[in-house]
Amino acid sequence: MNSGSELIVEMLRRSYFGADGLWYVMVEEEFGPEKAMELDERVWRVMPKLQARKARELLDCRRDSPAALVRCMALKFAAEGHDYAVRTPAPGEAEIVITRCPWREALESSGRTHLGPEIADRICATEGATWAIEFGDGIEFAMTEAICHGAERCRFAFHRARGEKTTE
C-alpha cells in the first residue's frame, strides 16, 4: 500500500501529465498540429528554466558545471517518474541516461506514438539545451539517443565547451 506522500506524488504527477496532454490536444483541435507543436515548444523553452532554478534552490546547488546540472535535472526526472542513471564519464562531462520515459508511455497509451520523434527533436532537445543555458554559457548539450527515435534509451549529454576551464 502506498503511503500518503506516495499517493500525493502520484496524484500530482498524473495531473501534471494530464494537464500537459489535455492542453496539447485542445490546442491541436483548435489550431492544428503544427501550431500545437510550436506552442508546446515555446512552453518548454520556459518550463526548464523554472525547473532548473527550483532544483538549484531545493538542492542548494550553486555550481555551474555539467555534474551539478545533471544532479539537479535528475530531481526533475525523479519527480516525473523516469527510470534513469546519472553518469560522469570524464571531468567536465555528465549525462543522464533514461531507460523508461513516462512521457513516451503517455504517447503509447493515447495512441499518439507518431508524435514521438518530433517531440524528441523539438521538445526534449529544447529542454536539454535550456537546462544547459541555466547552468552557464560554457556548458553544451547533445541528445545523442532517443527512445522516440527507436533507441533503447534517451541520453542527455552535457559537457564543458572547448576551452572552458573544468573545475569538477
Image: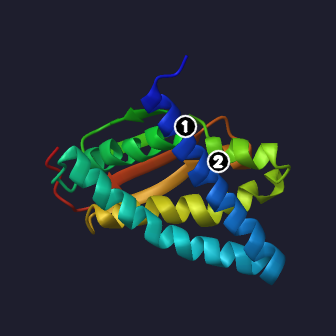
- Image position, residue 96 (x, y; %): 44, 41
Q: Secondary structure at mark 2?
A: helix
Looking at the rendered structure, which numbered label has been put on residue 10?
Answer: 1
Give the answer, above or below, for where 165 lies relative to 37.
above
Q: Residue at x 45, y 42 (%)?
A: 79
Between discs 2 and 1, the one toward the N terminus: 1
Q: Quadrant of residue 162?
A: bottom left
Looking at the rendered structure, which numbered label has been put on residue 60?
Answer: none
Q: Residue furthest top?
A: 1
Q: Is residue 62 left or right of residue 17?
A: left
In the foreground, 16 or 86 = 16
Q: Residue at x 76, y 71 (%)?
A: 26
- Image position, residue 117 (x, y; %): 73, 57
Q: Secondary structure at mark 1?
A: helix
Compute the Cα span from label 2 to label 1.
14 Å
Q: Which residue is tagged 2?
A: 103
Q: Is residue 23 left or right of residue 109?
A: left
Q: Quadrant of the C terminus?
A: top left
In the foreground, 42 or 7 = 7
In the foreground, 140 or 70 = 70
**Of the residues shown, which amino acid type is indicated by label 1?**
Glu
